[in-house]
Image (cartoon, rainbow, N blue to C red):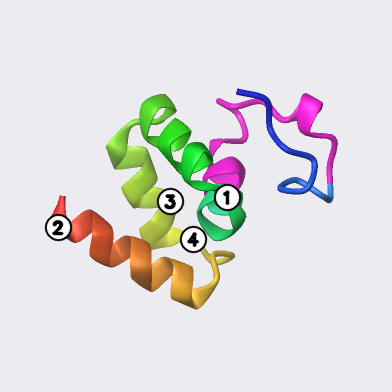
Amino acid sequence: MKLRQSLFWDTNPDKVDIQKNAQYIIERVLDFGRDTEVKWLYETYDKSLLRNTILNSRSLMPGTKKLWTLILKTK
């Protein structure tokens, strides 16, 4: 999937490595992404990485963190 420039406004999305920059990508997509991008996260990253990123993130917006913590508890 091609990363949107508007999602990664502070960097060149073509230079973002999906493995090395996984936490950065997960945080941006969960905060500002579209449904298709969130679906892509689930298909691309291990569920434990998603869970750990959400629980340990210091940059996710508080509302986003609460929402995804609740969603992950029900799955």
Mark 4 or 1: in front is 1
Above or below, 8 against 59 in this view is above
- Read off the residue under disc 3: 53
Task: Indicate left or right for 71 with 2 as reference.
Answer: left
Q: Position of residue 30 (x, y in %)?
A: 50, 54
Question: Along the polypeptide, which appears first: circle 2 or circle 1?
Answer: 1
* Few, some or many residues within 10 Å of mark 3 (<14, 14–19, 20+): some
Residue at mark 2 to residue at mark 3: CA–CA distance: 17 Å
For residue 46, what is the image quadrant? top left
Q: Where is residue 49 in the image (x, y as percent from the top left)?
A: 37, 40
- Read off the residue under disc 1: 33
Residue for point 52% across, 39% down: 37
Residue at mark 4 to residue at mark 2: CA–CA distance: 20 Å
Mark 2 or 3: in front is 2
> What segment is highlighted magenta in the picture?
11-26
Residue for point 43% across, 51% down: 53
Question: Along the polypeptide, which appears first: circle 4 or circle 1?
Answer: 1
Amino acid type, mark 2: Thr
Above or below, 20 against 36 in this view is above
Q: Where is residue 5 in the image (x, y as percent from the top left)?
A: 80, 40
Residue at mark 2 to residue at mark 1: CA–CA distance: 21 Å
Residue at mark 4 to residue at mark 3: CA–CA distance: 6 Å
